[in-house]
Amino acid sequence: MLTMQDRMNTRIHPQWIEQKFAWYRALWIECGELIEHYGYKWWKKQTPDMEQVRLEVIDIWHFGLSALFDGKQGVAAIAEQIAMAVEDFTPAGLDVREATEALALHALQTHGFCPQRFWELMHAADMDFNDLYSAYVGKNVLNFFRQDHGYQSGSYQKLWQGREDNEHLVEILAALDSAAQDYADQVYQCLQARYPGPRADGSQ
């Protein structure tokens, strides 16, 4: 996943590590979006949209992974760092809102990313590592798909048949086997089959 994230970030900006982008800011804003999907308004009836909550968890993971690249450590060293941080993880029993706020607060205070607090959020959202991996690959592919279809230029269509591309992605991932060797390719092909705009090569 670290390798895939590096590839995605490099696609957007070749010297992304040296640019020292404010990944922590994107991270805590995603936390706010997660809470919107989960619900926080006690003055009206709200039902948590857990599929969208889990997609926001994956978006947070994208920015969290990015924040761990400092230009000094390679992918293997960062992976070991994450593994050691969560090796003896014991959930504190926070609910989704509490875990999200704890992660956002850490990001705001340190301008960094805490794998342990992220693991707490994963646990609160009823996700395990396999869930994280399969959804991450799916969202990473969607991000490449967006770039291939004009995300930066503004020509990409995010709404397909009245629904956001993220919602289509959830349906696609549910129908595929994440253990398949060509899992990422299958996700891309399914996105292409649903996309209402022109293909990346300009054809309809």
Image (tube, rainbow, N blue to C red):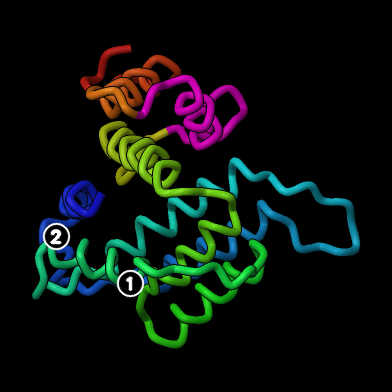
Q: Is residue 160 above or below residue 41?
A: above
From the viewer's side, name the closer residue of 47 and 24.
Answer: 47
- Residue visible at 28% across and 70% down in the picture: 84
Q: Quadrant of residue 111?
A: bottom left
Quadrant for the C terminus, please.
Answer: top left
Residue 166 lies within the magenta run: yes
Badge 2: residue crowd in 10 Å (few <14, some 14–19, many ≥20): some
Q: Is residue 20 above or below residue 122?
A: below
Q: Secondary structure at mark 2?
A: helix
From the viewer's side, name the closer residue of 115 and 112.
Answer: 115
Give the residues in magenta: 157-178
- Residue visible at 39% across and 35% down in the picture: 156
Where residue 10 sits in the image (x, y, percent)?
A: 16, 53
| Left or right: 158 in relation to 184 | right
Q: Is residue 199 above or below residue 52?
A: above
| Left or right: 23 in relation to 196 | left
Residue designated by label 1: 85
- Residue visible at 50% across and 26% down in the picture: 174
